[in-house]
Amino acid sequence: MSKLKVVVVDDSALVRSLLSEIINKQPDMECVGTAADPLQAREIIRERNPDVITLDVEMPKMDGLEFLARLMRLRPTPVVMVSTLTEKGAETTLKALELGAVDFVAKPRIGVSAGLQELADDIVDKIRIAAKAHVRRLVAPVTPSPAASPATQGTTPATPSTPVRLSTEKVICIGASTGGTEAIKEILMELPADAPAVVITQHMPPGFTASFAARLDSLCRIRVAEARDGERILPGHAYIAPGGKQFSLARSGANYVAVVDDSPPVNRHKPSVEVLFRSCARVLGPNAIGVMLTGMGGDGAQAMKEMRDAGAYNIAQDEASCVVFGMPKMAIQAGAVHEVLPLKQIARAIMERVAGAGVRHRI
């Protein structure tokens, strides 16, 4: 079997050397070229035709985001971004995912050599996932600026044409991984301000979920924030599992409340979709609407089946619209899913379900 061809683009000679070494130790991949800046990278990519590119965010001669945008317009290729663990780095990484990067690796600000070696397994796993991802050509401007949010654009929310009586008891429960930041954004931007509460686990490391939540909050009608331990889960709000923590739900009297703790990884993930969905099955029962979005692996599939058995109605994103069809596929195979939909139809399906539009086609 031919090896995955990887090109490493980073202005640090040390990082280029370390990433090349990590890649070349793998039996199924090789580093076929390195570049210190996007101008060098352009020629190497043209000559070597890589399967995956690792790309530093901040580089000389051409900004990494500008290079990524040009690449995704002219020669769409799976890209894993290499980002610094800073607030600015997190915001830039989210923009890179918006432009079409498949995933990212958060490199430490100090102790880079030891830090990257510790991340070696994560790096090569993300390269393998990226090689299988569905990358799309960038053909139009991406997210509008916060000043031009959906509320000011007059965008029609994803609600049925008939009046909606929203139940404060209903909770939308979303799980996602690779490709999930953009999928989550697309769904949340379509929800009306008085939508049911949304609880979300997106596989993401510490330091990035706060920026992710803030960006979504600037774009959506509903309020979006990281979940805080003990807070009440309210309609019109979305709660995102903090990176490096586990997020679940509990009942306090007549209310649902967030539980955020430091319990161990589940399915190698922290936060884990399994943890959130299992609590949703136990606490919400038929008041839950489960949504499994793009991502690699099977985290959350069995717990989503528990949700269905407890009376929840579950939706999975279809393969054609997924960046990686792993998590939805596993949930479907587990018998956890009532229907499979393209991403663009999920928000409307959720609101139709909330409005009592009737049971749609089951699979």
Image (cartoon, helix red, strand yellow):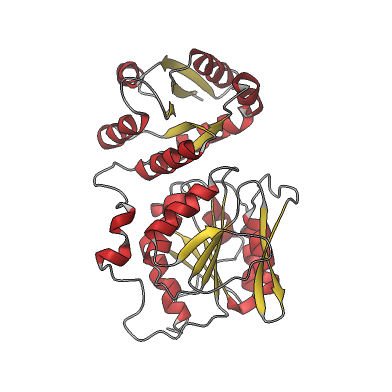
Give percent across and percent down for residue 10: 44, 21
Q: Is residue 125 visible?
A: yes
Judge whether 168 appears above or below 136 on screen: below
Camera-side residue: 37 or 45?
Answer: 37
Camera-side residue: 191 or 148?
Answer: 148
Residue at 30%, 18% (x, y): give it: 39
Residue at 57%, 42% (x, y): give it: 207
**Would residue 333 appear left or right of 250 to someone viewing this image?**
left
Give percent across and percent down for residue 180: 48, 51
Residue 313 figure quarter: bottom right
Residue 78 figure quarter: top left
Camera-side residue: 363 or 37?
Answer: 37
Residue at 58%, 80% (x, y): give it: 169
**Would residue 162 appear left or right of 251 to someone viewing this image?**
left
Judge whether 249 appears above or below 28 on screen: below
Q: Is residue 306 visible?
A: no
Judge whether 8 appears above or below 314 on screen: above
**Would residue 346 appear left or right of 176 to someone viewing this image?**
left
Give percent across and percent down for residue 218: 40, 57
Give percent across and percent down for residue 134: 40, 43
